[in-house]
Image (tube, helix red, strand yellow):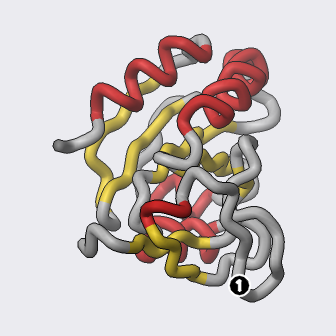
Amino acid sequence: MSTESLHIVCPHCHTTNRVANASLGQAPDCGKCHRPLFTGHPVALNEAAFDKHIARSQVPVLVDFWAPWCGPCRMMAPAFEQAAQQLEPQMRLAKVDTEAEQNLGARLNIRSIPTLALFVGGREVARQAGAMGAADIVRWARSQRPG
């Protein structure tokens, strides 16, 4: 991976952008749709968008696998939102509704929800099941980053 720039997938149009490392903290915009690449909010992903973000993004992607009927998932949602504000732009936070994206949940062997999974360089490097508060999400995510 180049130390001068990173590939960042837009949370809005899912276009891959090249962003200089020095510009990462300066609210870069997408070259295609001109919207912010980082919003401080998790991005909801369907299976196709998930695959694109995991394969092409050169920042770690932390995914919350959840379902609308899951009480602990709904309780954790505000904490995951707060974690996004603390972890971006060094990490992309995303949410996958396993009820709507059942094939993706099955493909990744998601057995309980909520489940957090951290993807780096296109592959899963860590997984944690169960609801957590914002501070615990941030601490866990930062402790899993390689290097």
Quarter containing the N terminus: bottom left
The correct choice, above or below, for 41 with respect to 26 in the image is above
Residue 83 horizontal/vertical position (percent) = 61, 27
Residue, far bottom:
32
User: Secondary structure beneath disc 1?
Assistant: loop
The correct choice, above or below, for 141 with respect to 18 in the image is above
Label 1: which residue? 31
The residue type indicated by label 1 comes to Gly
Residue drawn at x 53%, y 70% is: 8
Residue drawn at x 42%, y 58% is: 59
Residue drawn at x 17%, y 43% is: 147
Residue 47 horizontal/vertical position (percent) = 61, 69
Q: Quadrant of residue 93?
A: top right
Foreground residue, 123 or 82?
82
The crowding category of the residue bearing disc 1, from other C-alpha atoms within 10 Å (few below 14, some 14 to 19, many at least 20), is some
Q: How many marks?
A: 1
Foreground residue, 110 or 62?
62
Residue, far left:
147
The correct choice, above or below, for 137 with respect to 48 in the image is above
Foreground residue, 85 or 122?
85
